[in-house]
Structures are given as structure tokens and as C-alpha cells.
Image (cartoon, rainbow, N blue to C red):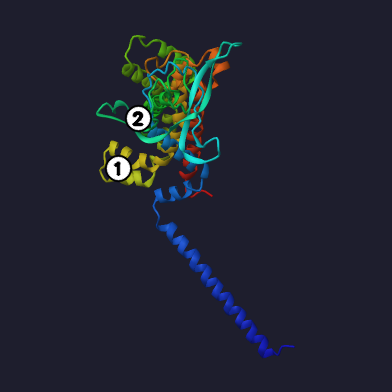
């Protein structure tokens, strides 16, 4: 049985322990809150964005794709137009690290021999386990000019064997015996860059026209909005097809590339213009805009230095969501023969070459460009979702 004095001492000890817990908790929470209070807008966006694991993984995938597109000559083991006469429609070459005896070895491939099936008369390939070709990094092979400036013959990986004897085909070969992985690397340069350049052109048009419409209002706003409504009433695919069909078929690759890019950007600017107009209508009477006007700032400076940066995060999120549509537009036009055409190499051109029954039945690996397109579109969509959530770091 406890005495009153012991009971009082017990209550005092409990209160002291509770006070210590509160002080420690307040100190921890205070430090966290202080870090949030002093953080910039971009730091808050980054902290929220990195919680989105799927968006982070998508960002890594897109970085890899764009690095491959930039250094396509170095990453591709062969020239995209090089023919392997003995390996037409050859399946993907498995890179092994264990031999037939189960021993661990450096990465290698077995030699492949081609034979014709007597019943189906189809060519098939069988591995000759008696001959191994080590897969090495930074091998010397076909000379090339990186970005058309630096001449070298170093490739990221490859095997030291004559082209007539063996090749390493990570995604197989097409019907003419060309390495599909090398063509995918070169095709990424056109397909991915068209998405970026087309969306950037749409961004410029959208900011200029949407900003003028939302900032000035009145008759200018009415005219611009009627133009936007007219363009948006026309279905995108028929309009793309009509404008692409008007391009001369004898145009060189560079001119055709910019023609397709302009067509895609001229149609895609309306959505960005609507977003910019709505933000300008909400911001044009804010205190910081009125203060800039009273300070003598010009209209262009107010728009570019004060209003646009205030919702730049929303623009970035909208861009990442719009890029997949441009990539799909180029791929679809090239697939039906109205976009990029051979000798240009894009993912749509590669899919057009696979558009036949023989490829579907005998060589399903020629549809690898479709997988890269789907993966890129999903990655951009997930990245856009993460950026859209991070664009408002104060939301819970």
C-alpha cells in the first residue's frame, strides 16, 4: 500500500517523464517543420516527387532511352543498314554466362548455324556449342562518325568475329538480315526527338496565344478562343493524315522530319493554350502582378518573368503528358506510310516493315518497336502523374 507522499512522488515522476517526451517530440516536429518552411518550391516538389516510386522508375527508363538515342552510333553494335545474308529473320541471340557444363563464364554467345527444314522449307537456326564468342565491351568494329563530327570505330559491345560468321542480335534480325537492336537505337533518335521538339513548339504557341488571350481578354480573347474551338472540333487523326499526305514524297529525310514535327505541333498547341489562358485569367489581378505594373514593368516582362514562372510546374507536368501523344502520332503516320519513310529510321518505319503475315507468323520479334513505343508511352504517363502531384507540394 502506497503512502500519500509516495503517491505524490509517483505523479511528479510521471509528469516529468511526460514533459520530457513532449519536449523531444516538439523538438523533432519543430526541426521537420523548420526544414519545410525554409525549403524552396523546387525542393518541396522534389521531395514529393521522389515518393512516387513508379514515376521515379519511369524517369530512369526515359533517361536511358534518351541516352541511347543521343549515342546511337556508339550503343548500336552494327550499322543499321548492314546486311547479314546468313541471318535473315534470325531470332534473338541469348547472351549466356553458364556453359553446357554449368560453369560460370564471362558473357558469351554460341555460334549459330542455319539449316532448311525439309518439310516446311523454312530456315531455322541451331546453336553450335563447340564454338563460343565472348561478348566484350568497347570493341572495335564498323567505323562511324558520332553526331557526324567525331570519327571512331569503338562500339559499346560486340563480338570479335567476321560478320559472315556470326553476329550478336539482342532483339533478332529483320527479313533482310539487319540487326534490329541497332535499328531500334537509331529509330529512337527520330521518334523521341519528334516528341520533344513537337511539344516544345506547341508550348511556345500555347504560351504566346494563350497568354495573350488570358492577359488582355476582350475581342482578342474571343478570336483566339474561336480558333481553338475550330481546331479542336476536327479529329486529330484525319487532320494529321490530310496534312501529312500533302507533303511531297520526294522530300529528303531532314525536310520530312521537320514537316511532320510542324504538323504535330500545329495541332497540339490548343490544349496548352487553354491551360495557359485559365492560369492567366486567375493571376492577372493578383497582388504581385499589380505591383509589377506599378513598378513600371513592361507587359512582356510581367508575362515572362512573373506570371509564367508562377505556374511553371503545371506546364512541365502538362508537357510530359503531351509528349506520348506526339510520339504516337509520328509512329501511327509512319506505320501507314504518311509519316517518316525509308531510308529514314524511326519506330513507326520499323513497324511498317513488320506489317506482313510472314513476320507475324515466323518472326514475332520484329514487333519489338511496338514494345518500345508502349514502354515509352507508359513511362511518360507515369512520369507526368508524378510531376502533376508534385506540382502542388502543399496538397495533402
Q: Residues within 10 Å of mark 2 (few under 14, many from 20)?
A: some
Secondary structure beneath disc 1?
A: helix
Would residue 298 be seen by someone viewing this image from the given angle? Answer: yes
Residue at 36% x, 39% y is 308
| Residue 200 locus on image (x, y percent) | 36, 30
Pick the quarter of the image with the N terminus: bottom right
Dividing the picture into quadrants, the one containing residue 211 is: top left
| Residue ID for mark 1 | 293
Query: Farthest residue toward the front?
Result: 130
| Residue 172 locus on image (x, y percent) | 48, 24
Q: Looking at the image, which is closer to me, 276 or 283?
A: 276
Dividing the picture into quadrants, the one containing residue 262 is: top left
Q: Looking at the image, which is closer to me, 54 or 239?
A: 54
| Residue ID for mark 2 | 204
In the image, which disc is placed on residue 114? none
Q: Earlier in the sequence, mark 1 or mark 2?
A: 2
Q: Residues within 10 Å of mark 1 (few under 14, many from 20)?
A: some
Circles 1 and 2: CB atoms closer than 8 Å: no
Residue at 57% x, 79% y is 16
- The nearer-to-camera label among 1 and 2 is 2
Instruction: Measure the alpha-carbon separation of dots 1 and 2.
Output: 24 Å
Task: Count the numbered circles shown.
Answer: 2
Would residue 217 be seen by someone viewing this image from the given angle? Answer: no
Eyeballing the image, is 391 above or below 83? below
Amino acid at each position: 500500500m502506497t503512502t500519500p507522499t509516495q503517491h505524490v512522488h509517483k505523479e511528479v515522476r510521471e509528469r516529468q517523464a511526460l514533459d520530457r517526451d513532449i519536449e523531444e517530440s516538439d523538438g523533432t516536429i519543430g526541426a521537420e517543420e523548420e526544414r519545410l518552411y525554409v525549403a524552396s518550391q523546387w525542393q518541396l516538389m522534389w521531395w514529393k516527387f521522389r515518393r512516387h516510386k513508379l514515376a521515379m522508375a519511369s524517369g530512369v527508363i526515359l533517361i536511358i532511352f534518351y541516352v541511347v538515342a543521343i549515342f546511337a552510333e556508339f550503343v548500336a553494335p552494327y550499322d543499321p543498314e548492314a546486311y547479314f545474308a546468313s541471318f535473315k529473320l534470325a531470332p534473338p541471340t541469348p547472351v549466356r554466362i553458364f556453359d553446357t557444363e554449368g560453369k560460370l563464364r564471362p558473357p558469351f554467345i554460341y555460334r549459330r548455324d542455319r539449316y532448311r527444314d525439309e518439310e516446311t522449307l523454312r530456315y531455322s537456326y541451331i546453336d553450335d556449342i563447340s564454338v563460343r564468342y565472348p561478348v566484350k565491351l568497347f570493341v572495335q568494329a564498323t567505323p562511324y562518325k558520332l553526331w557526324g563530327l567525331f570519327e571512331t570505330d569503338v562500339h559499346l559491345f560486340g563480338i570479335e568475329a567476321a560478320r559472315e560468321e556470326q553476329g550478336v542480335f539482342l532483339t533478332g534480325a529483320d527479313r533482310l538480315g539487319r540487326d534490329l537492336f541497332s535499328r531500334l537505337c537509331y529509330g529512337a533518335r527520330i521518334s523521341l526527338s519528334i516528341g520533344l521538339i513537337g511539344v516544345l513548339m506547341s508550348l511556345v504557341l500555347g504560351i504566346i496565344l494563350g497568354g495573350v488571350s488570358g492577359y488582355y481578354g476582350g475581342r482578342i480573347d474571343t478570336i483566339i478562343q474561336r480558333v481553338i474551338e475550330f481546331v479542336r472540333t476536327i479529329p486529330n487523326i484525319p487532320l494529321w493524315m490530310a496534312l501529312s499526305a500533302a507533303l511531297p514524297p520526294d522530300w529528303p529525310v531532314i525536310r520530312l522530319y521537320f514537316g511532320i514535327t510542324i504538323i504535330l505541333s500545329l495541332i497540339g498547341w490548343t490544349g496548352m493554350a487553354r491551360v495557359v489562358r485559365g492560369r492567366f485569367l486567375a493571376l492577372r489581378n493578383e497582388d504581385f502582378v499589380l505591383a509589377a505594373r506599378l513598378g513600371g514593368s513592361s507587359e512582356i516582362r510581367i508575362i515572362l518573368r512573373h506570371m509564367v514562372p508562377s505556374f511553371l510546374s503545371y506546364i512541365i507536368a502538362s508537357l510530359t503528358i503531351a509528349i506520348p501523344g506526339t510520339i504516337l502520332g509520328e509512329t501511327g503516320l509512319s506505320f501507314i506510310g504518311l509519316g517518316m519513310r525509308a531510308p529514314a529510321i524511326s519506330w513507326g518505319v520499323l513497324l511498317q516493315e513488320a506489317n506482313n503475315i510472314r513476320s507475324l507468323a515466323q518472326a514475332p520479334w520484329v514487333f519489338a518497336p511496338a514494345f518500345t513505343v508502349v514502354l515509352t508511352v507508359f513511362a511518360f504517363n507515369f512520369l507526368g502523374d508524378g510531376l502533376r502531384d508534385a506540382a502542388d507540394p502543399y496538397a495533402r
